[in-house]
Image (cartoon, coloured by chain):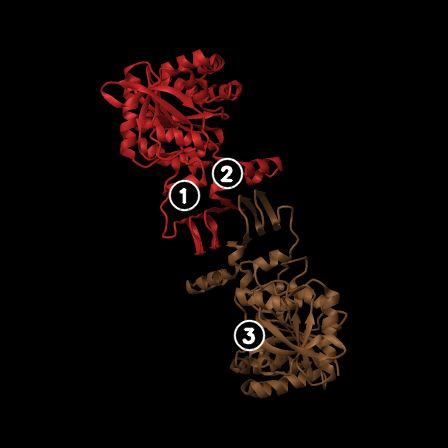
Chain colours: A brown, B red
Amino acid sequence: MGNYAVIMAGGKGERFWPWSRNDFPKQFLNLIGERSLIQQTFDRLNGFFSPEKILVVTGKAFLPLVQEHLSELPRNNIVVEPLGRNTAPCIGLAALYLLKKDPDPVMLVLPADHLVINEKAFLSCIGRAMELASNEDVLVTIGITPTRPETGYGYIEKAEPALAKDPMVYRVQRFVEKPDNQKAREFLDSGLFLWNSGIFAWKARFILKKIKKHLPLLYKHLQEIDQYLGTEKETEALAKLFPKVPEISIDYGVMEKEPKTLLVQGDFGWDDLGSWAALAEHSPRDKNHNVSKGKHLSVDTKDCLVYGQEALIATVGVSNLAIVQTNGIVLVCSMDQAQDIKKLVNQLKAEGMEKYL
Amino acid sequence: MGNYAVIMAGGKGERFWPWSRNDFPKQFLNLIGERSLIQQTFDRLNGFFSPEKILVVTGKAFLPLVQEHLSELPRNNIVVEPLGRNTAPCIGLAALYLLKKDPDPVMLVLPADHLVINEKAFLSCIGRAMELASNEDVLVTIGITPTRPETGYGYIEKAEPALAKDPMVYRVQRFVEKPDNQKAREFLDSGLFLWNSGIFAWKARFILKKIKKHLPLLYKHLQEIDQYLGTEKETEALAKLFPKVPEISIDYGVMEKEPKTLLVQGDFGWDDLGSWAALAEHSPRDKNHNVSKGKHLSVDTKDCLVYGQEALIATVGVSNLAIVQTNGIVLVCSMDQAQDIKKLVNQLKAEGMEKYL
């Protein structure tokens, strides 16, 4: 029984438009620090998992980027989805791959594009989750101790402690969708709710069993795909069969229907970096509380994030803005409305301006 | 005695940085409408003055631009200053040029880069000024009926009406520097103060007489220069002698010392377009009160001026900003601090970043 990490790296990351583009999504950006987010995720796992024990699932278009960013990763450890179908199919496919390598693999599943500040605490938390997942047939999820009434995350309500000997492991009461401001405040004050991190641990055989139970159509298609994996017909079969699988998240498709899930509480400076505002929160700031990349000249400017790729960006008398210049695009966005970049992206699609995406 | 217009086109226009650059100042920009400001100034005068009767004074570096923008203007009607020395030397030099063409020229002097909305009222006003300047030896200045408590302009206080038959012509009480907010409000409420437009009319001989009286050193250098004008040594002599003349404005050097000046009150939708904010005030706006040039995509954006040269500019949740993208530079500036662009320009100079100017 081997331990594996599965990095999900198929996301589009429209929330960092225009720094992220369709052909260059968030996980490949060095939004914070000098290494890209996927590199930081890999580095963080490396040591706990050898490169041979790390699997990356990504989209067809991103294969060259994954190879470039993760040169230590064996080519055979990159699983290529012909198109994105959300997390349940991605995880099911990864489980099948691992079962080709190992009779009873335990898998840690995590997104490629999250921020973790305290790596030691992170490793300790995932170590605990992997141990639980090895010991019995159980789904394990990691919940993050919340530090603010965040409305951008889903929450998990804790039930009773699951283990006498470990105060950080709980049963799950329920999964909750993104709350409004008031609910988020109540969640924080109660001390009973954790942020849903999207990080999981389980045996590959066990998650497939649960997919079979809750998502039988997905399971059927995965079974079909399975016979071609590792053969020369693999790519062709995936291209033909994968588009047929239902598009559904593992949370919605499986986790919410599994009351016996274990919850490991973690507190390691985590953020899913869901917006320019979130990025600014976690970046080092200058004396005027600005975050800058590239050439920035300012007069009376504070609380701004200024990312310039080629241009000199000059600011006068402004505050609380994200200003991003890259490759023929300039974005000027209020930090308070950073989520509304999605509306811009939709406008670009609606007006046939896909070349800017 | 002929009537001439002298367009002063030597300004640098740093207040429209980065749309204006050292090698492409404000008067050559089409900030508003399809024609550049100098073209609009020329067009406005054309008809009242034939092209042969229009003189343009500009800097050496701008000669090709003047020729390109004003193709109808005879080459001999462009006076080239080897460097800028403010308005008094410019006007003195223009007076000497005109006296080579005409024994007793009357000259209208005006900047190249102002906005005039009502051209008919403008022409009627300058016609009246030229008539006054022709009839007697007098300095005539044009004052604009103020429409707001503007702190960015100098003012002229009216004294008694000068002519029984014309209620728009006054004696001058005094010239006043740019006021603070409270003074500007008092000026507006009093009805006695007009904006100093920087537009003048007088005989060339008479302004030279006044320069001789108030600026004797300038007069002395102009006399020296005069012997070379129209000869093959003109350019060489100007290059050698013009740098020696004192740098001083006609307002400060002459007008403020001449109590007998006549003041013609005009009301023709005038603005000196001294900032992005002033430009926005006078530009047509869309339903969200935005002014755009180039490609602009917006979500929840109002009261902004967005000028893009090459890039797509996307805005989310912002208001009251000037956003200007051109040739490797992006400016994001609060409309309320549009005057502080000068501070940026000074920073660029201080940091050896002249290539951006």
Nearest to the observer: residue B234 or residue A139: A139
Residue type at mark 2: give it.
Answer: Arg
**Where residue A200 sits in the image (x, y, percent)?**
66, 76
Instruction: Mark 1 vs mark 2: give the one in front.
Output: 1
Chain ID of residue with mark 2: B
Residue type at mark 3: give it.
Answer: Gly
**Do dots 3 and 2 share one subunit?**
no
- The residue at which mark 2 appears reads as B21
Is A258 placed above or below A283 here? below
Side of A125 relative to B9 (left or right): right
Is B202 placed above or below A158 here? above
**Where residue A47 sits in the image (x, y, percent)?**
77, 70
Nearest to the observer: residue A51 or residue A134: A134
Q: Distance between the residues labelled 1 and 2?
A: 19 Å
For mark 2, give the secondary structure.
loop
Chain ID of residue with mark 1: B
Instruction: Mark 3 vs mark 2: give the one in front.
Output: 3
Question: Quick one: label 2, few (<14), some, or many (20+) residues within 10 Å?
Answer: some
Q: Hey, which quadrant is residue A160 in on the image?
A: bottom right
Q: How far apart are marks 3 and 2 (CA)?
A: 48 Å
Chain ID of residue with mark 3: A
**Where residue B309 sits in the image (x, y, percent)?**
46, 48
Query: Of the residues under marks 1 and 2, which one precedes in the sequence?
Result: 2
Residue type at mark 1: give it.
Answer: Ala
Side of A185 relative to B181 (left or right): right
- The residue at which mark 3 appears reads as A84
- The residue at which mark 1 appears reads as B280
Q: In this view of the protein, can residue B48 be seen by the observer?
A: no
